[in-house]
Amino acid sequence: QVQLVESGGGLVQPGGSLRLSCAASGFAFSTYHMGWYRQAPGKQRETVARITGRGTTNYADSVKGRFTISRDNAKNTVYLQMSSLKPEDTAVYYCNALTAGWVPVYSWGQGTQVTVSS
């Protein structure tokens, strides 16, 4: 069965950094695009960053230059390195596998909470 397990969230001060991990299992990880999403209270889930199976990346304008998505196909894991964090980055962060058309494939996991506050 498919599992997507996000970890690495926490409380961080503005300007700080965090590294999120998403451990995937139950599907052919290296053949899928992967993406990070986030959902803040009262808002819709939004795309943060995406990466193809070969490592091509794209980012939401709000995180460009601050966040970096990467993947380790040997470990079936996708990462999100977040730097220069802002209070508006506060949200629950999720990962998912994506189709060639960038559509999320599987049910969402529990996510990992990121809170940016002084």
Image (cartoon, grey):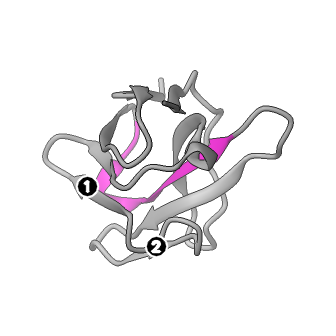
Q: Is residue 8 left or right of residue 49?
A: left
Residue beneath label 1, please?
71
State the SS at label 1: strand
Q: Residue at x 61, y 67 (%)?
A: 102
Q: Let me know if residue 37 is in the magenta part.
A: yes
Q: Which residues are magenta?
A: 27-39
Residue 93 at x, y = what percent? 54, 38
| Residue at position x 78%, y 32% in the image | 41
Asked if residue 10 lies in the magenta stretch, the reply is no
Marks 1/2: CA–CA distance: 18 Å
- Give the amino acid at mark 2: Lys
Say which element carries label 2.
Answer: loop
| Label 1 crowd bin: few (<14), some (14–19), many (20+), radius 10 Å | many
Q: Is residue 26 above or below residue 88?
A: above
Disc 2 marks which residue?
A: 64
Whether 33 is drawn above or below 28: the answer is below
Residue 7 x, y percent position in the rendering: 37, 26
Assess disc 2: are there few (<14), some (14-19) or many (≥20) residues with their C-alpha within 10 Å of its C-alpha: few
